[in-house]
Image (tube, helix red, strand yellow):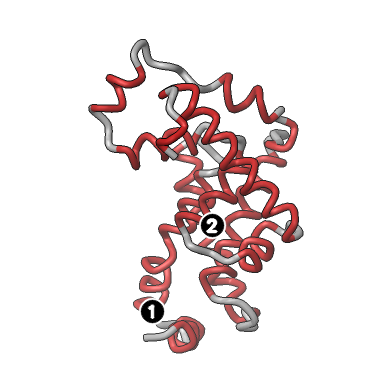
Amino acid sequence: MNDEQLISRVLTGDMQAYTLLIRRHERIVGHMISRVVKNAEEVEELAQDVFMKVYQNLSGFNGQSKLSTWIATIAYRHALNHLRKNKMSFTDIPEEESFSAHFVEEENPETELEGQDMDQFVLALVEQLPPQYKIIINLYHMEHMTYPEICEITNLPEGTVKSYLFRARLMLKEKVKKIIGKEEWL
């Protein structure tokens, strides 16, 4: 069933279709929220709120973007509103401080890496990025979204998205170089 058919069925009150919509998009909603909010219980609650908003506003979906982009936008903005409501702002976190202050180096990083999966290592480093960079890198590399889709979700100009992606990659590269001492890993 394509998105158009799914939307039509949800709008007629088909709860199985709504459940299918949730299953198809729960991963991206979870990713979007967890990149901004760290508390697992809050993430789950916010995800439920997002799907309620999706259900309530689905009739307003105009199809100008992909359904997944529209839902990701709702999730991203809902998570940001949650931060604002709780008087937290990720843009106030100094880039260098927020990245390095939360990273705990192991006594012997190379030995630690040998026992870890490289993907998990990289994901752990991504988690240490400031939220604005973490979201962009996640959307681009993990969700395989285009610049225009990311711009729509984050409401940022394309130049800013590209800049954030460049900075995030640079921060990751520098951190890996520092930990491993080998630039050729990247």
Q: In this view, does 55 lie to the left or right of 18?
A: right
| Residue 69 image label | none
Q: Above or below — where is 124 with respect to 144?
A: above
- Quadrant where the N terminus sits is bottom left
- Please tell me which residue is depicted at 42% across the width and 72% down the height of the picture: 21
**Residue 95 in which image quadrant:** top right
- Please tell me which residue is depicted at 57% across the width and 68% down the height of the picture: 69
**Residue 36 in which image quadrant:** top right
The image shows residue 169 at horizontal and vertical percentages of 56, 42
Amino acid, disc 2: Tyr
- Please tell me which residue is depicted at 49% across the width and 57% down the height of the picture: 29
**What residue does disc 2 label?**
140
- Quadrant where the C terminus sits is top left
Indicate the secondary structure of the residue bearing disc 2. Answer: helix
Q: Nearer the viewer, residue 131 or 77?
A: 131
Decide: few, some or many residues near mark 2? Use Cα within 10 Å; few <14, some 14-19, many ≥20: some
Most distant residue in the front direction: 184
The image shows residue 93 at horizontal and vertical percentages of 70, 29
